[in-house]
């Protein structure tokens, strides 16, 4: 049997372990630094309420990925979900993505519509600010995007954010009912403990080493050292920040982290019906609140809300700055052909969600089977 070593036991690592098990012929070891699998996707309990670290709503456009997850953790549809944003200067909550009906009700709608007519389009945009102003005009940018992204990325100027292909969701202003334009499957597990079963099920048959660190990498020699012992592998699947494999020889890859707060409210519900997340686009320190009951359907006379505050604690969000992406690319370029790097940190790609980790694992398994990282993957595998 050939040996596969997986680093990291989050969505990407566990999905990879399962794809190799389905393929067969692999002796798989997964090394996880913490005492648990699943990282922030794991359900914990507070005040009797189930919660994850942030919302972790299952949203995908890929039917194969939806079916796969539904087969492991049966999913309840969340197709009714709405996200709204608080805009203090209007003292109003508006839909996100931005919606025509809300614009029509805004006090400055004439100015907004004038700016939209003048907008030149995002084709020549050089940074996030240009991208949005050129698409929707300055007033909408200031209401929804400006402060939110400064908070999110800990920057004083959105011109510093010089990639934006991760931010197309709101550029096309929506109109009509959600069902007409939202093509994603929106879901959450029925199980009270959310995705926890996924993290047990996917690693059945894998040797899992929890609370374990890799002391040394020898990528050219296809070996690592754990507790002083050498472990050889045929393929290495990395799901953690790629700089760690190289002793950060070109410099440390930067990430934004999160401080997370859990708040119990003394009422059965606090958000309006159908509203799952609230975004805050002003100068409050938090970016997003989630009322977990909307997804979990947990029954209780109280309700639990999670609050996210961007910080430097944790390596959750790879930076959308060219400089940082180029640095990550230097590490990717140095990876030998038997090293695969996937997942959010492993790809160093913001906007890569749970469903994407599964999709990447499916693609990777196909490439491994067909003979290598650059092997093309037929469309039907990744977009059904
Ligand atoms: C606050 C927040 C909210 C989110 N909400 C959603 C959502 O609603 N829907 C959605 O689809 N996605 C959401 N996501 C994104 C989604 O959860 C991630 O895409 C997914 O969890 C990434 O999985 P991963 O395996 O790549 O990384 P991680 O989940 O970070 O897993 C990496 C694992 O590697 C381990 N590790 C780290 N370093 C080492 C090391 N040196 N050696 C061994 N192990 C190590 C970590 O302990 C961790 O277990 C959210 C993310 C955040 C941060």
Image (cartoon, rainbow, N blue to C red):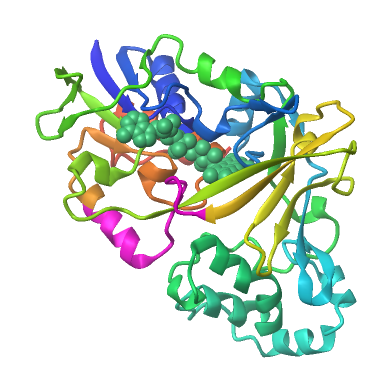
Q: Residue furthest left?
A: 221
Residue lying at 53% horizontally and 80% vertically, measured from the top left: 130
Q: Position of residue 312 (x, y in %)?
A: 44, 53
Residue 297 lies in quadrant: top right
Say how many tags the image has. Answer: 0
Q: Position of residue 5 (x, y in %)?
A: 28, 23
Considering depth in this image, is 219 or 49 the residue closer to the camera?
A: 49
Residue lying at 61% horizontally and 25% vertically, measured from the top left: 195
Q: Is residue 110 visible?
A: yes
Q: Is residue 278 left or right of residue 44?
A: right
Q: Is residue 153 left or right of residue 262?
A: left
Q: Position of residue 281 (x, y in %)?
A: 68, 66
Q: Position of residue 267 (x, y in %)?
A: 90, 38
Q: Is residue 381 visible?
A: no
Image height of 172 relative to 136, above or below: above
Residue lying at 85% horizontally and 77% vertically, measured from the top left: 106
Image height of 117 relative to 69, above or below: below
Q: Is residue 224 left or right of residue 375?
A: left
Asked if the stretch drawn in magenta spans residue 327, the answer is yes
Quarter occupied by the C terminus: top right
Asked if the stretch drawn in magenta spans residue 257, the answer is no
The magenta stretch is: 311-330
Residue lying at 43% horizontally and 74% vertically, measured from the top left: 160
Considering depth in this image, is 300 or 101 the residue closer to the camera?
A: 300
């Amino acid at each position: 049997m050939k040996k596969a070593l997986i680093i990291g036991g989050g969505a990407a690592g566990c999905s990879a372990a399962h794809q190799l098990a389905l393929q067969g012929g692999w002796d798989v070891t997964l090394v996880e630094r913490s005492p648990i699998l699943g990282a922030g996707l794991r359900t914990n309990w507070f005040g009797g309420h189930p919660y994850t670290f942030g919302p972790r709503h299952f949203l995908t456009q890929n039917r194969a990925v939806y079916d796969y997850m539904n087969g492991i953790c049966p999913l309840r549809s969340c197709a009714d979900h709405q996200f709204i944003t608080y805009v203090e200067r209007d003292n109003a909550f508006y839909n996100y993505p931005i919606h025509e009906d809300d614009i029509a009700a805004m006090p400055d709608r004439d100015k907004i519509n004038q700016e939209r007519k003048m907008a030149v389009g995002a084709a020549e945009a050089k940074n996030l600010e240009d991208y949005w102003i050129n698409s929707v005009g300055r007033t909408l940018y200031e209401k929804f995007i400006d402060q939110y992204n400064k908070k999110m990325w800990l920057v004083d100027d959105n011109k510093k954010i010089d990639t934006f292909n991760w931010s197309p969701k709101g550029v096309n202003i929506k109109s009509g009912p959600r069902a007409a334009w939202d093509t994603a499957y929106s879901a959450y597990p029925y199980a009270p403990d959310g995705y926890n079963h996924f993290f047990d099920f996917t690693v059945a048959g894998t040797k899992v080493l929890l609370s374990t660190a890799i002391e040394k990498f020898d990528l050219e020699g296809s070996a690592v050292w754990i507790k002083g012992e050498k472990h050889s592998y045929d393929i290495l699947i990395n799901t953690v920040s790629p700089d760690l494999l190289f002793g950060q020889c070109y410099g440390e890859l930067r990430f934004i982290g999160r401080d997370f707060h859990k708040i119990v409210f003394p009422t059965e519900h606090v958000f309006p019906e159908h509203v799952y997340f609230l975004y805050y686009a002003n100068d409050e320190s938090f970016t997003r609140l989630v009322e977990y009951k909307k997804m979990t359907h947990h029954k209780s006379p109280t309700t639990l809300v999670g609050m996210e505050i961007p910080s430097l604690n944790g390596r959750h969000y790879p930076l959308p700055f060219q400089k940082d992406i180029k640095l990550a690319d230097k590490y990717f370029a140095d990876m030998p052909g038997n090293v695969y790097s996937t997942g959010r940190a492993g790809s160093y790609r913001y906007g890569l969600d749970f469903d994407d980790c599964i999709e990447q694992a499916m693609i990777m398994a196909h490439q491994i089977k067909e003979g290598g990282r650059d092997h093309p993957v037929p469309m039907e595998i990744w977009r059904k």
